[in-house]
Image (spheres, rainbow, N blue to C red):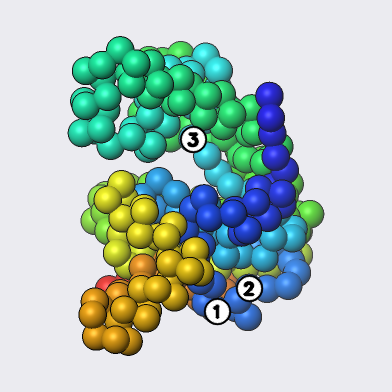
Amino acid sequence: MLSFSYRNSIRILKYLPLCPWPEAVGLANIPKDGPLIYIYNHQTTRVEPLFLALAAPPDPPIRFFVDAKVADPAILAETLKDVRNSVFSLSAQEKWARHSLTRKLMEKTSRMLTVFLTANITRYNFIPVFVHPPGSPEEESIKRRINREAIESCLRSLENDEPVAIAPRGGYTHQEATRSHVPTTLPSLAEMLQKQGKTLKIVPSVIQEKPQLGFATYKRYIADRILPYRVFRLLLQRLGIKRYERPRITVQFLPPVTFPCIDSSKEEKVQFVLHLQKIMLDVLNRD
């Protein structure tokens, strides 16, 4: 199975117009050393982690938290469904499913991408985490084990100054902030490192798409990466023939935040998480 390293994947995407290329803002806010975690909004498309990886410094490689089902061959069918829905819109799936040839092409393409994705999990050094609700006591036990191992793996990386990126579900960065349960993984990690004499630096990273990336706008983003096309559209605008609004994806790295408390209470951790969330939502709402 063909596979790519983290750095080589970024090089390929940088020089080949296969996906939109984000503009990095605030790179000076990223600490040069010490334990570092990026937190980013993950509420518009499925590819915000890719944009963060492309915008952030490529060395050392970032370790991303990913849904454990991506790394588990036992639930390949569920991953296959997610990949198919990411690549083909629902209307396209309905249309292609009507004909045997296009249906087979869609299924083979989805399966090939799924197998490629799962084969590269180890190369990209992702951290699997169990995020979907467990459906049985056995799954609940599996969830506790996987998430405990994820925290341990994350902590080892931070101890070795390997950056980690996380997009918590509905807690730190989402508009769904009003939900009653607020995860406190970040301040807990910060406390563990403080006891070792290390300070965890948390970099809020706001990813914005104008217009929002989707099936209808993907071609515009890709075409804008091709210089002759961009020059032609700008020329038409200069001549007053047709206005051209360039699509933009930006990844804004905000100043790092630290959790100052040792042996803090649950409430202090929750308030810190809500503070991080507010920082990011203020940027999203302002822009």
Q: Position of residue 53 (x, y in %)?
A: 58, 57
Three-letter code for the amino acid on which mark 1 is drawn: Gly
Between marks 2 and 3, how big is the CA–CA gap? 26 Å
Of the residues under marks 3 and 1, which one precedes in the sequence? 1
Q: For label 1, count other residues whose C-alpha is less than 10 Å away and answer few (under 14), some (14-19) or many (20+).
A: few
Label 2 close to label 1 by CB (< 8 Å): yes
| Whether residue 38 is situated above or below residue 142 in the rendered picture | below
| Whether residue 190 is situated above or below residue 63 in the rendered picture | below
Q: Nearer the viewer, residue 166 or 186?
A: 166
| Whether residue 99 is situated above or below residue 157 in the rendered picture | above
Three-letter code for the amino acid on which mark 3 is drawn: Asp
Q: Which residue lies under the disc numbered 3? A: 67
In the image, which is nearer the foreground, mark 3 or mark 1? 1
Q: Which residue lies under the disc numbered 1? A: 26
205 sits to left or right of 35: left
74 sits to left or right of 214: right
| Marker disc for residue 269 | none
The structure residue drawn at horizontal position 53% and vertical position 59%, both measured from the top left corner, is 52
Judge whether residue 161 can be spotted in this image.
yes
Q: For label 2, count other residues whose C-alpha is less than 10 Å away and answer few (under 14), some (14-19) or many (20+).
A: many
